[in-house]
Image (tube, rainbow, N blue to C red):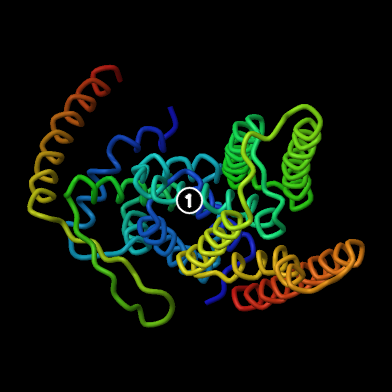
């Protein structure tokens, strides 16, 4: 039995909403599967989704959420990995290039921006899933958040370079150890989340820098090579994701 | 007050009554409720109630294959569920008697 597009979207939104509300994964899957089975049976008898969710899918999702307990231990388990990953993304590149330095400013503000960024994403994910925004609006909001974060980081970096003295510059050996720790975090996170993104993306970001530590190339050429590897890689990733998504959708509907 | 609002308070008891008649799953409960004239509720509203009943230990559930399509979650009453159902029946009887007497007198 094939669900209508509306029902598929409702199920996906419900799942996202409950996940970003910090509910337990097993419980989420249980209620989502039960509702999917109900929707399939209802639709096969010619009913539509409104007869199941009532007039307000939003209120209906909230009524399910309120019957589920928030899985704080699940969130607590996720947060350290999240923070480690963020640190790994920020530190691995400079560590490989041997450009790592810490100032009071970056030490305090980088984690702060990271937390604000995560908070903003969670907030909009929840809002998005109940309001059923158009794809255009979703993309606009996420581009907005992304842009704000990058802008904040850029502004900080600028202030940092001109007004703050680094209070700690690790030696080349320590920098290599930090880089190795970063790579370990990427591998562990890929195994843990069973996704290849945290292997491929760091490889694209930092692989060229790593290789060029051992090859003599000019600075300009180095920049051109690492930038073109990154963008070619990103285009490839998005193409793969796009086709995967398309295949999945044609399976479901 | 709409009938769906009125029903909210007693839906828990009605679901206990339906499950008491024999092991059943979500969609079938709706069909049975409709047979008794409960057409005023949206179908999905039984699920938050079922979640609550399960949390309170009044029902048990088990996943079973369906002839075609996804697995179904079948519910049965626990011992506590049977007791709660009897209490609900007594409470409802007392309340509906009072309401009926009151309305009859008015008319």
Q: Please report the residue visible at 58 percent of the width from the left and 63 percent of the height from the top.
A: A8
Find residue B68 and report its horizontal and vertical position in percent: 42, 81
Q: Which of A114 and A41 is in front in this view?
A: A114
Residue farthest along the bottom direction in this orientation: B67
Find residue A23 and report its horizontal and vertical position in percent: 40, 48
Quarter of the figure with the C terminus of chain A? bottom right
Find residue A142 and report its horizontal and vertical position in percent: 72, 46
Rendered image quadrant of residue B102: top left
Q: Please report the residue visible at 66 percent of the width from the left and 78 percent of the height from the top.
A: A247
Q: Is residue A165 left or right of residue A77?
A: right
Q: How many marks?
A: 1
Where B56 falls versus B94 (above or below)?
below
Q: Badge 1, how many Cα within 10 Å: few under 14, some, many 20+?
A: many
Residue farthest along the right direction in this orientation: A220
Q: Nearer the viewer, residue A207 or A113?
A: A207
To which residue does mark 1 refer?
Answer: A19
Q: Is residue A72 left or right of residue A92?
A: left
Where B87 falls versus B39 (above or below)?
above
Q: Nearer the viewer, residue A149 or A54?
A: A149
Q: Which of A156 and B60 is in front in this view?
A: A156
Tell me the element at label 1.
helix
Find residue A67 and report its horizontal and vertical position in percent: 35, 43
Q: In this view, does A193 lie to the left or right of A170?
A: left
Give the chain of mark 1.
A
Q: Please report the residue visible at 62 percent of the width from the left and 39 percent of the height from the top.
A: A168
């Amino acid at each position: 039995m094939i669900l209508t597009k509306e029902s598929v979207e409702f199920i996906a939104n419900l799942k996202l909403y409950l996940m970003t509300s910090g509910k337990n994964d097993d419980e989420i899957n249980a209620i989502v599967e039960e509702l999917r089975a109900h929707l399939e049976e209802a639709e096969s008898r010619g009913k539509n989704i409104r007869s199941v969710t009532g007039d307000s899918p939003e209120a209906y999702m909230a009524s399910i959420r309120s019957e589920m307990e928030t899985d704080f231990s699940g969130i607590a388990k996720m947060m350290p990995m999240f923070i480690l990953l963020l640190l790994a993304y920020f530190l691995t590149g400079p560590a490989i290039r041997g450009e790592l330095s810490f100032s009071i400013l970056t030490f305090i503000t980088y984690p702060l921006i990271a937390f604000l960024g995560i908070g903003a994403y969670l907030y909009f994910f929840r809002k998005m899933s109940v309001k059923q925004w158009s794809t255009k609006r979703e993309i606009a909001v996420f581009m907005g958040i992304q842009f704000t974060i990058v802008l904040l980081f850029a502004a900080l970096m600028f202030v940092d370079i001109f007004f703050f003295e680094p209070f700690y510059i690790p030696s080349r050996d320590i920098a290599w150890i930090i880089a190795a720790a970063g790579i370990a975090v990427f591998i562990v996170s890929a195994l843990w989340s069973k996704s290849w993104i945290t292997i491929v993306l760091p490889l694209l970001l930092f692989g060229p820098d790593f290789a060029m530590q051992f090859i003599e190339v000019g600075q300009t050429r180095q920049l051109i090579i690492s930038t073109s590897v990154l963008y070619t890689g990103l285009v490839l990733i998005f193409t793969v994701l796009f086709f995967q998504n398309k295949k999945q959708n044609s399976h479901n509907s | 007050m709409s009938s769906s609002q009125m029903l909210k308070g007693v839906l828990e008891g009605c679901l206990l009554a339906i499950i008491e008649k024999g092991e059943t799953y979500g969609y079938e409960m709706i069909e049975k409720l409709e047979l008794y004239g409960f057409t005023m509720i949206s179908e999905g509203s039984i699920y938050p109630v079922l979640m609550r009943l399960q949390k309170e230990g009044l029902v048990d559930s088990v996943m079973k294959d369906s002839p075609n399509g996804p697995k179904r979650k079948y519910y049965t009453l626990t011992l506590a569920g049977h007791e709660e159902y009897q209490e609900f029946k007594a409470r409802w009887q007392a309340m509906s008697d009072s309401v009926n007497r009151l309305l009859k007198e008015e008319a």
